[in-house]
Image: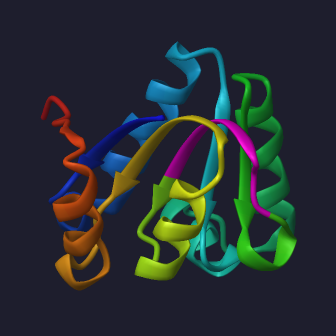
Amino acid sequence: MNRFIIEDAAKDPKAYLDASILWLRDLGGGTVVSDLKANLMRTLGASTDTEFKKVEDRLSRMGVSLAWRRGGLPHHGNVVAAFTTRDLIEELDGRDGIENLLVLGWSPNDYSAWMDEHDPTRLQIRE
């Protein structure tokens, strides 16, 4: 597994999520994962399920899907862990079929131990 992190993603969540979606697209597709659907909705600017479905449809045309803990998590491919908790990062990291894992860091408490253990490649987005 190739591991990546963007540490300061909390300063502009929408911009960093948008950049990570393009990263997935450029890899041929993948899944953006969060703990809660509401976190994805809020960050993607969808205030209703209807708006969220439109976002999902647009992203699916790019080869990108959205997932959250209750809806089922991916077991393979390219994954962005978007502003997730430590246990979800560790769960995704433990899945053998995941090829590339990008963590969008929200709180160092959630990703610092994972960083210390796995020494991921640090990425930055152009501003």
Residues rendered magenta in the picture: 73-80
Name the quadrant of the C terminus.
top left
In this picture, residue 83 sits left or right of residue 73: left
Say which of 73 and 127 sits in front. Answer: 73
Q: Nearer the viewer, residue 96 or 126?
A: 96
What residue is at 72 percent from the left and 52 percent from the top? 66
- The residue positioned 55% from the left and 73% from the top of the image is 88
Asked if the stretch drawn in magenta spans residue 79, the answer is yes
Let me know if residue 45 is in the magenta part.
Answer: no
Q: Quadrant of residue 63?
A: top right
Magenta stretch mostly in which secondary structure? strand
Q: Is residue 90 above or below residue 38?
A: above
| Residue 107: x %, y % from top left | 24, 79
Count how many numbered circles sit on residues in the image. 0
User: In the visual, does 81 lie left or right of 109?
Assistant: right
**Residue 112: x %, y % from top left:** 19, 71
Q: Quadrant of residue 125?
A: top left
Q: Position of residue 37 (x, y in %)?
A: 70, 74
Asked which colour scheme the image uses, the reply is rainbow
Measuring 55% from the left and 63% from the top, which residue is drawn there?
A: 45
Q: x and y percent of residue 22 in the render?
A: 47, 26
Instruction: Look at the picture and state if 41 lies above or below 126.
Output: below
Q: Nearer the viewer, residue 73 or 117?
A: 117
